[in-house]
Amino acid sequence: MSQGVPDSLIPWVGRAQEGDPAAFEHLVTRLNGPLRSFARGVLGQWAEAEDAVQEAWLRIWRRLPHLKDRAAFTGWAYSITRNVCLDRIRSRDRLKADSLDAQLLELAAPEAAQPEAQAERRLELERAWGRVAALPLAQREAFLLVAVHGLSYRDAALAMGSTETTLRGRLARARASLTNDPGEEATP
Amino acid sequence: MSSLPCGRTRDDVLQNLDGPPDAHELQCPWCHDERARLKDLDSGLASILRTSDEDGGNDDGAVAAVMRAIRENLRPLRSTSAVAAGSGETVRVTSLDLADAVRDAFGESQRIQVNYVDVRPEDSAAPHRTWRAECAVSVTPDSDLTEVEASVVSQVSAGVRAVVVADHLIVDVTLEDVHGETLRHAVRDS
């Protein structure tokens, strides 16, 4: 890519739209980790997140020629990943606390074999994921997209199929819950 | 909902946590402290969750798995009957052949970044001799758009005509800023 224009995904998106798999691989390399981490946050487990993101990439590849706004690619990719995750949650009826249980089990399983520092880190992670997993889904997604993955309000709203105003409200409620005010009520 | 001594609430601060503090917050010590506390909590938690990415396993392996699945689902490229520029023979060219030729024509331009190219026949009779090229490029902020537009038309024309005979070529140019926002759109004959 040329040096005068800052590095961005836009030319890679365009090239992938033209049908070049190598350009698409560049997009996968750049975004697979964040999408997988987001899917893990929504679904609660890495293994299922891995499958969900692979399914999402196939959908992205098939629908890519129809994407009009190349600059919106990142938000669009999160949106498709989110939809795949929601389909999985619906089909497995996992919207309730078993998601949290599963992820806590997954995190806790290897603990016996870990050195102390690693075990402490796992415990810290376990607590962090536990707090996020306890949020209503829409708030959890808003927090993951903006605070953890650094998406703009515009891209995060696009990913969630909502308005920026709605997103802002969900994010504020998520943060209110996460900062542990006992007076807060969890609302989606 | 926690009220602060100034009359605002913690929710007021949370609503605008990602934006700059407003005039009240700038001069209010309670809002200032609450913002700092909430920012610390928020970024601390986000940072822990971000570091947990490494628990997800080898991303190289995941990318390879995705690309294997993609390669099994490659879209067929559009293939068109055309007159080869060099030999004059009737040949079939793919949409990617034509896009490659246009991108090659731009070379390593420092001012223009090619974002998207699509070259399609405009006439109905094969082999085709009338073409329409859609080309979207990003330009640096200090660019002269009229000059860039003329350059894009010229490079697209050179790229297409390096591969196929084009008695008539319509170039549909979109100039974008570095964020992909459209600055100018024009349709030119070449």
Image (cartoon, coloured by chain):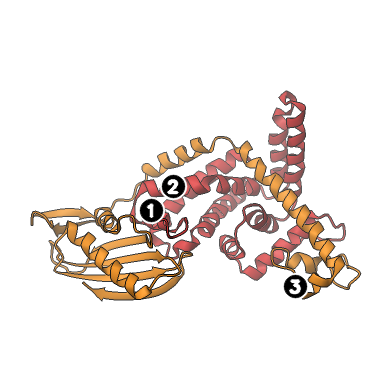
Residue behind mark 3: B22
Give the residue displayed 72% in from the left and 56% down from the top: A136
Residue B125 versus residue A103 in the image, above or below: below
For the C terminus of chain A, the image quarter is: bottom right
Q: CA distance from mark 3 to mark 2?
A: 40 Å
Amino acid under label 1?
Answer: Ala
For the N terminus of chain A, the image quarter is: bottom left
Residue B49: % across, % down: 68, 46
Which label's residue is closer to the chain start, 1 or 2?
1
Q: Give the mark toward the camera: 1 or 2.
A: 2
Quarter assignment of residue A142: bottom right
Judge the density around disc 3: few (<14), some (14-19), many (≥20) Cα neighbours within 10 Å: few
Residue A93: % across, % down: 64, 48
On what subunit does the disc labeled 3 rest?
B
Residue A50: % across, % down: 55, 41
Q: How many marks?
A: 3
Q: CA distance from mark 1 to mark 2?
A: 9 Å
Residue A32 makes an appearance in the image:
yes
**Chain A shown in which color?**
red
Give the residue displayed 29% in from the left and 75% down from the top: B187
Amino acid under label 3?
Answer: Asp
Residue behind mark 2: A26
Give the residue displayed 74% in from the left and 58% down from the top: A174
Q: CA distance from mark 3 to mark 1?
A: 42 Å
- Left or right: where B113 falls relative to A112: left
Q: Which mark is residue A16?
A: 1
